[in-house]
Image (cartoon, grey):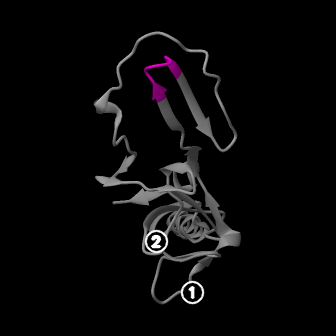
């Protein structure tokens, strides 16, 4: 083997050892504190080395209570933070198509909790996640849930 071949092999081995970035699949084993397992032979990854992206962080909006009074022709919306005025007037029928509106994730209706509609739920035990391993394998970016 020539010197140039040996140097190339050393460089390739060094690059592999640095692990600049690699995709991993993990499973959430604890929600609070967050822990994700990527390998049964290895201890779960702790929250300190996990960086969450927007797609795995809970997002919610206040659920509005909606009322119509067709006799007095008023219209209002209320939420925990306040309510709108009843300044809308005119004639409008109630629309049955608006009942049962829900956020759906992978074919399952997301819950409404404590006056909020959950748009994107937080990570839960058992969720499969896609991870990007970075910084020499010492930190992980949680990219998304897997279905």
Give how far across and how far down residue 50 sits, in percent.
Answer: 63, 66
Q: Is residue 104 above or below residue 40?
A: above
Secondary structure type for disc 2: strand
Q: Position of residue 30 (x, y in %)?
A: 55, 78
Q: Is residue 87 left or right of residue 98?
A: right
Residue 71 part of the magenta segment: yes
Q: Quadrant of the C terminus?
A: bottom left
Residue 39: % across, % down: 46, 82
Residue occupying image coordinates x 53% and y 20%: 74
In the displayed orientation, state which residue is furthest to the top: 90
Give the spatial CA distance, label 2 vs label 1: 12 Å
The spot of residue 26 in percent (x, y) is 46, 71
Q: Can you name the residue that lies furthest to the bottom here? A: 41
Badge 2 density bin: few <14, some 14–19, many ≥20, Cα 10 Å: many
**Residue at the image position 52 percent from the left and 12 percent from the top:** 89
The residue labelled by disc 1 is 43
What is the total number of numbered labels drawn onto the structure image? Answer: 2
Residue placed under numbered mark 2 in the picture:
26
Q: Is 14 inside the magenta-drawn segment?
A: no
- Helix, strand or loop at mark 1: loop
- Residue at the image position 57 percent from the left and 49 percent from the top: 59
Residue at the limit of the structure toward the front, as seen here: 71
* Range of residues picked out in magenta: 68-74
Q: Quadrant of residue 51?
A: bottom right
Q: Which mark is residue 84?
A: none
143 left or right of 136?
Answer: left
Closer to the camera, 17 or 102? 102
């Amino acid at each position: 083997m020539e010197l140039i071949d040996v140097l190339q092999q050393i460089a390739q081995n060094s690059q592999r050892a640095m692990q600049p970035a690699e995709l991993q699949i993990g499973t959430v084993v604890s929600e609070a504190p967050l822990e994700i397992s990527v390998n049964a032979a290895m201890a779960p990854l702790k929250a300190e080395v996990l960086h969450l992206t927007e797609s795995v962080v809970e997002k919610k909006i206040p659920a509005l209570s909606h009322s119509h009074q067709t006799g007095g022709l008023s219209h209002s919306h209320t939420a925990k933070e306040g309510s709108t005025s009843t300044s809308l007037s005119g004639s409008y029928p109630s629309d049955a198509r608006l009942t049962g509106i829900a956020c759906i994730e992978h074919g399952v209706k997301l819950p409404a909790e404590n006056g909020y509609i959950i748009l994107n739920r937080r990570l839960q035990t058992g969720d499969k996640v896609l991870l990007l391993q970075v910084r020499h394998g010492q930190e992980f970016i949680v990219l998304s849930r897997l279905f």
